[in-house]
Amino acid sequence: MTMILASTSPIRLQMLTAAGLVVEPVAPRVDETSIRDALVAEGAHPRDIADALAEMKARKVAERRPTDLVLGCDQILELEGKVFGKPETPEQARDQLCKLRGTTHKLQSAIVAYENAEPVWRHTAEARLTMHQISDTYLDDYISRNWDSIRQSVGCYKIEEEGVRLFSAITGDHFTILGLPLLPLLAWLGTRGMIAR
């Protein structure tokens, strides 16, 4: 059985391969923005939105690869009940970071596994991140220096890069913050006998 990552995220693929897993990335071709916006309009909880998007990605790829184990992942950023998406412009990134600074927001990271084109396991984990009251000058310089990288991030930052300087406190699993609850996944794979422990 081939293990498939229903994602084009380089960091998720890197986490899995660094853990010694052999994974094939396959683009799920899902309109995440439309699905997320529809779920937000329905009043869905951010945790449920992350889970629904992760399942949608896994299902789309599993329909094409039913004999493989397919992993779908997604991450939602929530601040005081509001859900944020990836910025499309530096101006959107600035607006979002202005809203996040001086506050604590949550990241909900979900993973859903499909086998035989059916969901067989899921997990959602939460992390809380408190951002400094960063200055306008630093904020503008940060976005200018890092735009090409942070444009792919739901929070407009990457803690594995300069973005770690934005924070005064972080509570939660490092892998959850990066967008994939890796330890629960490895535990599940171990109990299934799919990896050695």
Image: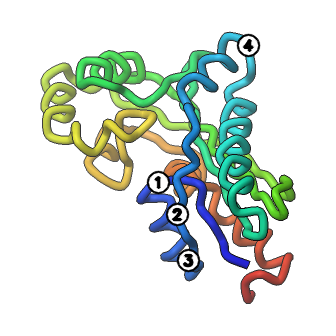
Q: CA distance from mark 3 to mark 4?
A: 36 Å
Q: Residue furthest front?
A: 64
Q: Amino acid at mark 3?
A: Ala
Q: CA distance from mark 2 to mark 3?
A: 15 Å
Where residue 26 sits, quadrant-wise, is: bottom right
Q: Are marks 1 and 2 in contact (CB under 8 Å)?
A: yes
Q: Amino acid at mark 1?
A: Thr
Mark 3 / mark 4, whichever is N-terminal = 3
Mark 2 / mark 4, whichever is N-terminal = 2
Viewer-side label of 2, 4: 2
Q: CA distance from mark 4 to mark 1?
A: 28 Å
Residue ID for mark 1: 8
Residue ID for mark 4: 43
Viewer-side label of 3, 1: 1
Residue ID for mark 2: 25
Which element is circle 2 on? strand
Residue 137, relative to residue 161: is it above or below?
above
Q: CA distance from mark 1 to mark 2?
A: 6 Å
- Could you tell me how many numbered marks the image carries? 4
